[in-house]
Image (tube, rainbow, N blue to C red):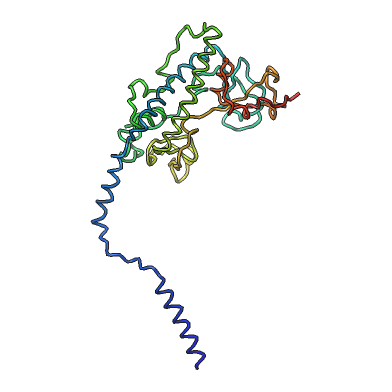
Amino acid sequence: MALRQRVQFRRWEDISIHIIRARNYSSKIDWKELRPMILKRIKDRAKDYPVSSMVPVANDVLQARTLLIEGVSALIKVIPIKACKFCPEVHIGGTGHLIRTCRGFRRSSKNLVHKWTDGSLNDIVPLVEAFHLRYMFQDVIRHDQRFDFDRVPAVVELCCQAGADVPEEKLYPHDKCTSGSSDDTHLLPHELKSVAQETLEAWERLRVGVHKLLFVYPAKVCEYCSEVHIGPSGHKARLCGVFKYETWQGTHFWKKAELDDLVPQKVVWHRRPHDPSVLLDNGRGFYGKSPAVVELCAQAGATIPNKYFSMMKVCGLSAN
């Protein structure tokens, strides 16, 4: 009997300790009165934007983007580029390589030889578009509103939200708003080198500036496709093709966007002086790579920054 009483007493002590240590989640706060305050605080976030110190950065990004597009447009009229007909592969040069990395039509095969066609500006500087918002913290775009908003380059939309003064002509895709001069095909060697150097510097300025803006302004990218949205939350337009025929009905799955999501590098094979004139498939482990803009400028005579040397395998061995 005494033993039973001791066990019950210890159990009661344990229960009392847990009751004392337990948190009391009951609250006398009236959430109906607090909700308008929360909504007002959310709306007041817009007063902190645009950040005045980032406006010069946004203007510099727009200027660098314009110089980059003009420079690449001039260089591709002198230096030929090739693009695969069935995949996103690009090669800088008169004849395409023989490296078997093509997946074929509808990605039904692999390790196929590329079928080369003439490339264009979008093959070197891919165009990433996003919805053009009226203001940064507006309501989320619904699926039935997807045609009510214009599609503009994502970098331009980021600069708009950062407070840059964007002219109307820069809101359109760069393949429609730029036209090269007929004198670009008659550039002298020193002029070609100067254009390539300015283009490469504009490329570096663009990436550095966008990287700074992404620290301040939110941007989203879909986990399963390349859709980009500039703003604190993604849109609800069901445009994702991964789950098009499933229960998600094309809904995007958003995550934080990185620099390469807004300014893709488009990596291509780099041909070194000791490599064969046409890159072969059996030497793919020896060849280097570089961003398409960097490779284009390098072939035009620009001085390449040291940070690309390891990627380009400048001091690497030859396949033979």
Q: Is residue 164 above or below residue 31?
A: above
Q: Residue at x 58, y 15 (%)?
A: 301
Residue farthest to the bottom, as pictured: 1
Whether 256 is drawn above or below 167: the answer is below
- Residue 87, percent from left and from top: 57, 27
- Residue 192 in the image: state x and y as whole percent: 53, 11
Q: Name the residue: 34% across, 28% down.
A: 164
Q: Is residue 265 left or right of residue 153?
A: right
Along the horizontal axis of the image, is 152 left or right of 302?
left
Q: Position of residue 84 (x, y in %)?
A: 58, 23
Quadrant in which residue 149 is drawn = top left
Foreground pick, 267 / 90:
267
- The residue depicted at 70 percent of the width and 23 percent of the height is 280
On the image, the x and y values in percent for residue 50 come to 32, 35
List the single residue furthest toward the left: 33
Kindly indicate the quadrant of the structure image that contains residue 294: top right
Pick out the residue farthest to the right: 320
